[in-house]
Amino acid sequence: MRRKRKRRPLGPRPALLAAIFATRGGVPDLARHVNLTRQAVYQWRRVPKDYLHIVARWSGVPAQTLRPDLFDAMGNEIIVDKHARPPSQQPTRQELLKKVATLERKLARVT
């Protein structure tokens, strides 16, 4: 017999997102506009970064209002690279030169 998995509650939806969902044709129209399923859009608790500017244009609500955590005090968008390493973990110049030399040797063997 299979055991049922417990579902995690999604939590409350912010009022701003609920208001956006209620405008311009609702979630089905927004889902078509961003090329996602309705179910995927219904699961949003905030607008994903990848869809922020599309939803802002569609809804007429500024992107800063939708996701203030992605903007600095001057209103400039903060670009977050989730793969970036902190400065303390960046390779040194010597490590990079060593890696280049290794790659050049491998390339010389191949050609």
Image: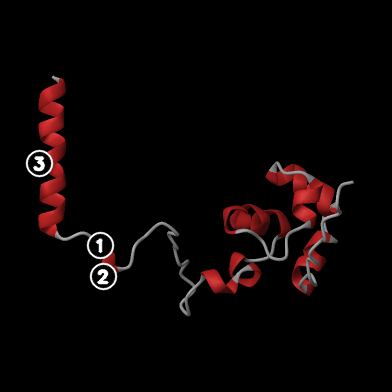
Left or right of residue 48, residue 38 in this image: right
Task: Report if the CB atoms under discs 2 and 1 are less than 8 Å apart.
Answer: yes
**Quarter occupied by residue 14:** bottom right
Residue linked to disc 1: 90
29 versus 75 height, above or below? above
Q: Which color scheme does this rendered protein use?
A: secondary structure
Q: Nearer the viewer, residue 83 or 45?
A: 83
Q: Amino acid at mark 3?
A: Ala
Left or right of residue 27, residue 51 in this image: left
Mark 1 Cα-neighbour bin, 10 Å: few <14, some 14–19, many ≥20? few
Q: Amino acid at mark 1?
A: Gln
Residue linked to disc 2: 88
Question: Residue 91, position in %: x, y?
Answer: 21, 59
Please report the residue visible at 53 percent of the width from the left and 69 percent of the height from the top.
70
Q: Nearer the viewer, residue 4 or 24?
A: 4
Seen as rendered, the residue at the extreme front is 1
Left or right of residue 90, residue 62 in this image: right
Question: Residue 2, position in %: x, y?
Answer: 86, 47
Residue linked to disc 3: 101
21 versus 73 height, above or below? above
Which type of secondary structure does the marked residue at label 2 adopt? helix
